[in-house]
Image (cartoon, rainbow, N blue to C red):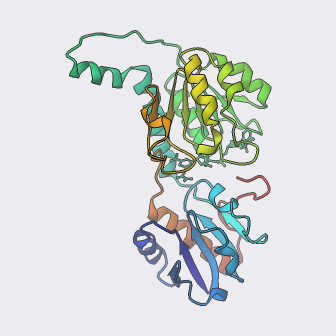
Amino acid sequence: MTLLVVMPGRDTAAVVDGLRAADPSIPVRVWPDTGPPDEVELALVWNHPPGALASLPRLRAVCSFGAGVDHVLGDPELPEDVVLTRLVDPALVTDMVEFAVGILVASRRSFVVYHDQQHRHLWRPRAYSRRRTAVVLGQGELGAAVGGALASLGWRVWGWSRSGRAGPGVTAVVGWDDLIEVVPDAEAVICLLPLTPATEGILDAELFAAMAPETLLVNLGRGRHLVEEDLLAGLAAGRPEAAWLDVFAPEPLPADHPFWDHPRITVTPHVASLTEPAAAAGLAAETWRCLRGGRPLPHRVDRSRGY
Ligand code: NDP
Ligand code: OXD
C-alpha cells in the first residue's frame, strides 16, 4: 500500500523529505508516478487534477496540504466513501494571527502613507481612531485565534460562526441578520470562512452597504467569498473604504485584473499563512498510522458541511 503525494506544480521534495523523517517505513510516491493505482491507500493533495483521485480504486483517505478543503471537495469525481482530513497546525494559526493583526495595525496607523510621505519629504502626522472594533467572519481554528488576539489588544470583536462558537474575549454573532446589525460598528471586517456553497459570494453588496464609512475589508479566506464587481462598486461608494485581499479566484490574479492598480486595494499573493511541508507531512504520516491501526483519523472534515 502506498501514500501518494498529488501537488502538481509544487516542489514536493520537502514534503517527501518530511514524510521520510516522520516515518521512513511509509512507501511514498509522487503524482503522476502513482505506481499500481490499486496500491494507493492515502493521498496528500493540493489542487489535484479533478478526476485524479477517482482513478485510485483502493483510496481510503485524502489529507489536504492546507487548512482549506475546497480544492478537494470541488472535484466532482471525488469518491463518496473517501475520508477527508485537513491541516490543523499551531504554526499556521500563529502566522495567520500575525498577518491579520499586522494588516489592521498598518492600516489604522497609516504605515504605507508615512512610507510614501518620507519619500516626498513630508512631515504630516495623521489622526487615528481609538475605537478598535472588528468583525471576524469564521470562528474556527484561524478566525477564533485572530479574534482572540485582537481582543487581547483591546479591540472590541464580534465573531461570526454557525454555532455561536467564538474566540476568547470575542462576542459571538450567529445568522445573517445579526451580522448585518453589528457590521456598521466595525472598523474592519475580516473573512476567515471556509469556502462552501453557503459562504460563496458572502462578501457582497448587502454586506458592504451595511458598513460604516472608513471600514477596511480583509479577505484571507478564499477568492470566491468575494463578489468582485460588488467590491469595486462599494469602494466607489466609500463602503468599504479600502480592501486588503490575500486570496483570489483564480490564482494567480490575472495580470490585467483591475484589483492590481486600484488605489484602495492591497493585493498579497496568498501568503497570510503558508503551510509548512513538514507539518503537512506529519499530518499525513499520522493519518497513515491511524489508517493502518484502525483508529479515527485526525482533523477529519465533515464532507456534508464542506469544512
Ligand atoms: P475552521 O473549519 O476551523 O473554521 C471555520 C469557521 O467558519 C467556523 O467557525 C464555522 O462555524 C464558520 N462557518 C462555516 N460556515 C459558516 C456559515 N455558513 N456561516 C457562519 N459561519 C460559518 O477553518 P479554519 O479557521 O481552519 O480556516 C478557515 C479558512 O481560512 C480555510 O478554509 C481557508 O479557506 C482559509 N485559509 C487561508 C489561508 C491564507 O493563507 N490566506 C491559510 C489557511 C487557511 P462553526 O464554528 O459554527 O462551525
Ligand atoms: C490553506 C491555505 O488552506 O493555504 O491552508 O489557504
Q: How far from the left and from the top, in percent, is residue 297?
A: 68, 67
Say whether residue 305 is visible.
Answer: yes
View extreme (left): residue: 121
- Position of residue 60 relative to residue 252, above or below, is below
- Position of residue 289 relative to residue 116, above or below, is below
The N terminus appears in which quarter of the rendering?
Answer: bottom right
Q: Is residue 143 left or right of residue 129?
A: right
Q: How far from the left and from the top, in percent, is residue 98?
A: 44, 38
Say whether residue 293 is visible.
Answer: no
Identify the image quadrant of residue 295. bottom right
Q: How far from the left and from the top, in percent, is residue 17?
A: 41, 74
Task: Report the residue at 61% width, 15% height from top.
Answer: 212
Identify the image quadrant of residue 80. bottom right
Number of marks in picture: 0
- Position of residue 111 relative to residue 251, above or below, is above
Task: Report the residue at 41% width, 68% height from top.
Answer: 11
Q: Is residue 11 left or right of residue 171?
A: left
Task: Report the residue at 58% width, 54% height from top.
Answer: 67
View extreme (front): residue: 256
Identify the image quadrant of residue 82. bottom right
Task: Report the residue at 47% width, 82% height from top.
Answer: 24
Q: Is residue 207 left or right of residue 149?
A: right
Q: How far from the left and from the top, in percent, is residue 93?
A: 52, 46
Q: Looking at this view, is 11 or 260 the one in front?
A: 260
Q: Looking at this view, is 306 or 242 the one in front?
A: 242
